[in-house]
């Protein structure tokens, strides 16, 4: 009926509306009578009556040592809404303060072991630009099949990769990456004095991933727009200061 549909807008459930309208129409009623009249199981009916009582829509009385219920004046609906509004208005400053804190608070997720760390690489493909600092050699040696599968999906997703790699990555990983990604891949080689460190840093969208590829293998994703922007600035500064010692010089990424 139209009345029941309108009452749904007051955040009452269909069962609560059925019970409330039954008691409103029939007056003083026992739980068994209400359950029978609304076709709601008696056990559920008790819970619904408790909720309506708590919201001030019905009142519990005693008759012949039995609990009976009667509906309050329908104006109680308005008082119920006003009460909720008063609570919200009272809590609003504290809720806003929490929201402002959460807005700038980074989210941190930890991944333990290489099988979980793989999930970081899969997530890093959900972007159009991926910035990386690390060793393709270490990743390729850790799991060659995964390394190739990762790069093939990068290609399929048309992800532009800007890579700052270690000198030893020229021997392992670089050739395969170039063959697979082709024009999607831009790289620079870090100076030889920076040895082949067993870590990987990935930056995409609002995320930064810090990964270690030597035992114990683990990774962390930090989600923070401000930190991600800062890491991109750092990447760009390193990129601008790194000369390409082999291969043709590539253009700076547009970050």
Image (cartoon, rainbow, N blue to C red):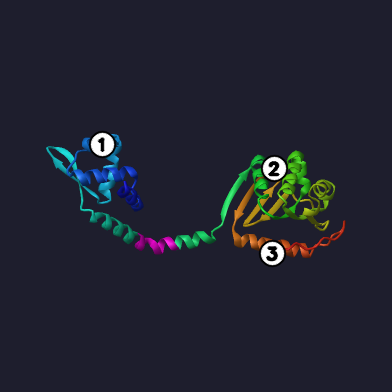
Image position of 88 with respect to 37: above or below: below
Disc 2 packing (10 Å; few <14; some 14–19; many ≥20): few
Which residue was labeled with disc 1? Answer: 35
Residue 130 appears left or right of 171: left
Q: Quadrant of residue 128?
A: bottom right
Q: Nearer the viewer, mark 1 or mark 2?
A: 1
Disc 1 packing (10 Å; few <14; some 14–19; many ≥20): some
Identify the mark at residue 233; answer none if there is no mark: 3
Q: Quadrant of residue 250?
A: bottom right
- Describe the element under mark 2 as helix, strand or loop: loop
Question: Residue at 26% of width from left, 58% of height from top?
Answer: 79
Span highlighted in magenta in the image? 88-96
Q: 222 or 26: which is nearer to us?
A: 26
Q: In 3D space, how far apart are the residues under numbered discs 2 and 3 (Cα atoms)?
A: 30 Å
Question: Residue at 69% of width from left, 64% of height from top?
Answer: 233
Question: Residue at 64% of width from left, 59% of height from top?
Answer: 228
Task: Find out whether residue 254 is within the magenta segment.
Answer: no
Residue 129, image x and y in percent? 70, 56
Image position of 48 with respect to 205: above or below: above
Q: 98 or 128: which is nearer to us?
A: 128
Residue 217, image x and y in percent? 67, 43
Residue 74 appears left or right of 137: left
Do the residues under discs 2 and 3 have CB atoms within 8 angstroms? Answer: no
Which circle's residue, 2 or 3, is located before the other in the chain? 2
Which residue was labeled with disc 2? Answer: 215
- Describe the element under mark 3 as helix, strand or loop: helix
């Amino acid at each position: 009926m139209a009345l029941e549909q309108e009452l749904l807008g007051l955040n009452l459930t269909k069962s609560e509306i059925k019970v409330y309208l039954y008691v409103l129409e029939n007056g003083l009623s026992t739980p068994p009578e209400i359950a029978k009249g609304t076709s709601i199981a008696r056990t559920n009916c008790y819970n619904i009556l408790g909720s309506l009582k708590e919201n001030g829509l019905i009142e519990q009385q005693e008759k012949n040592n039995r609990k009976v219920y009667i509906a309050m004046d329908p104006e109680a609906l308005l008082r119920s809404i006003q009460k909720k509004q008063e609570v919200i208005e009272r809590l609003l400053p504290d809720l806003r303060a929490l929201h402002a804190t959460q807005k700038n608070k980074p989210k941190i997720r930890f991944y333990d072991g290489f099988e979980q760390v793989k999930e970081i690489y899969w997530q890093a493909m959900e972007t159009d630009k991926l910035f990386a600092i690390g060793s393709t050699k270490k990743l390729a040696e850790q799991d060659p099949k995964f390394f190739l599968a990762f790069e093939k999906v990068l290609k399929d997703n048309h992800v532009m990769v800007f890579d700052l790699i270690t000198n030893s990555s020229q021997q392992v990983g670089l050739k395969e990456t170039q063959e697979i990604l082709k024009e999607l891949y831009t790289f620079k080689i870090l100076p030889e004095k920076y040895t082949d460190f067993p870590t990987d840093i990935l930056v995409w969208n609002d995320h930064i991933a810090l990964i270690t590829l030597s035992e114990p293998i683990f990774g962390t994703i930090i989600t923070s727009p401000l930190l991600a922007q800062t890491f991109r600035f750092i990447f760009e500064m390193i990129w601008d200061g790194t000369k390409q010692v082999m291969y043709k010089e590539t253009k700076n990424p547009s970050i």
